[in-house]
Amino acid sequence: MKKRFFVVIILVSFCVSSFAQQTDARLAWWKEAKFGLFVHWGLFSVAGGDWKGKPSKGGEHFMMYEKIPLKEYATIAAQLNPIKFNADAWVKAAKDAGMKYIVITTKHHEGFAMFNSPSNDYNIVKASPYAKDPMAMLAKSCKKYGFKLCFYYSLGRDWADPDVPTNWPTKGGRSNTWDYPNEDAKDFAKYFERKVKPQVKELLTQYGPVGMLWFDTPEMINKEQSKELRELILKLQPNCIINERMGNGEGDFNVSEQKLNKSAASKPWESCITISRQWGFNKYDTTYKSPEVLVRNLIEVASADGNFLLNVGPNGEGEISAYSLRRLASVGEWMNVNGEGIYGSHAWKIQGEKIDVEKEIKKEAADKNTMKDVFNDATSQKTPADIRFTAKGNVVYVFVRSWKTQDALVKAMSAGKENIQSVQLLGYKPVIDWEQTEEGLSIKLPANYRPALPIYTFKITLK
């Protein structure tokens, strides 16, 4: 009996180990990439923050906030004609920013598909004057530029379907209760079979290789359905990775929304952050993060062994705003010099020194955020002088962020702690003046070198 028990334990351990190895292999490209572009685009982009001549509530969720009947909301599709959409320009801007993949909303909570969906006519090809498939164009451009194409899909919320119950923050809290008031009559299984599975199949069979399916809001999906969905995805595209929001622990990596984890986690993770205040295009949204803050965010995420997914919201005509493009270009300029400290890196033994973190959202902002899945940016806009670390092999990258003085002291690299072979400043060819003491590694920042952003990357090679 004991022998049989041990055999079972060995077999289970082997299966778990094999599954983990397969997952790691599928995640390899993503872990190397570190930096991606998130795009929120849909009918809400056409409205752009207005409804019936007035500013709307709820950003890209305004259909729910304003309780707009589906029949009335669907009329926005007649105005969807993104004639300025240029897939090449989008992908090139992302690539020039140092990004390696794009995640785009193929269907947001509003239920409208931004792709050709033969199984459901509520889509950009059938229901808009544009009558073309932007995902097909993106797939072509991604192939051209060697970029990974990834798709976002709202899983547990769909305000165009009568069978989608929700349970956050309370029963029916994110459901279409104005068109379909009987929450108890809604059957998620019907929606799952009628819409989710067919559209997921379409996304995985119409556009070539898909690097990732990025699900949102699992809500009422059960364990069996999550497993079935995972099996379907991997059957159609065995190398496709999946985020945690497919539900019930079936995803490959975790998501930290509008937050920057301060330490490495046991499971792979990704931080998705807005470049401005909102996810989708809103003409009243004029609060954009500075390039310095964006690079700090990228470093902070990388130092904690995560991926950074930065969001932009194109308008209804298909244009990414000049505000966003200028910031992406500035980030790209920094990445051209310092990217080797980000790509393929992992967390060092500590994440940073002299961290000054804004620990909570200001009360004034929190009081306005009664629905925290719309305006929920908890990232700091401050730029205190501090140090972060990443590592690759016998190299440690030291990011000296927002530094105001000529000397930097890295306490974690004091004499006796690390055996240093060399110190280089990325983007600067002359020899760097450094000294290792009991207090730390003292580095003299060159007086004749100022990077475009006040963030220096030192490459420390250890013996």
Image (cartoon, rainbow, N blue to C red):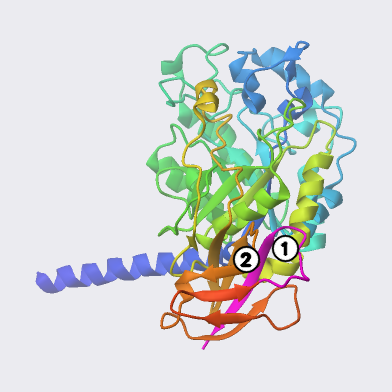
Q: Quadrant of residue 317?
A: top right
Is the C-beta separation of discs 1 and 2 under 8 Å?
yes
Residue type at mark 1 is: Met
Side of 385 where 455 appears, left or right: right
Considering only vertical position in the picture, is 416 above or below 214? below
Closest to the observer: 442 or 461? 442
Seen from the viewer's position, the closer of residues 15 and 174 is 174
Q: Which mark is residue 208?
A: none
Give the labeled residue for mark 1. 335
Please provide percent x and percent y for residue 281.
Answer: 74, 32
Instruction: Report the quarter where the N terminus lies.
Output: bottom left
Q: Which residues are magenta?
A: 445-463
N-terminal of the two: label 1 or label 2? 1
Q: Position of residue 343 (x, y in %)?
A: 63, 67
Q: Which residue is mark 2?
A: 342
SS at badge 2: loop
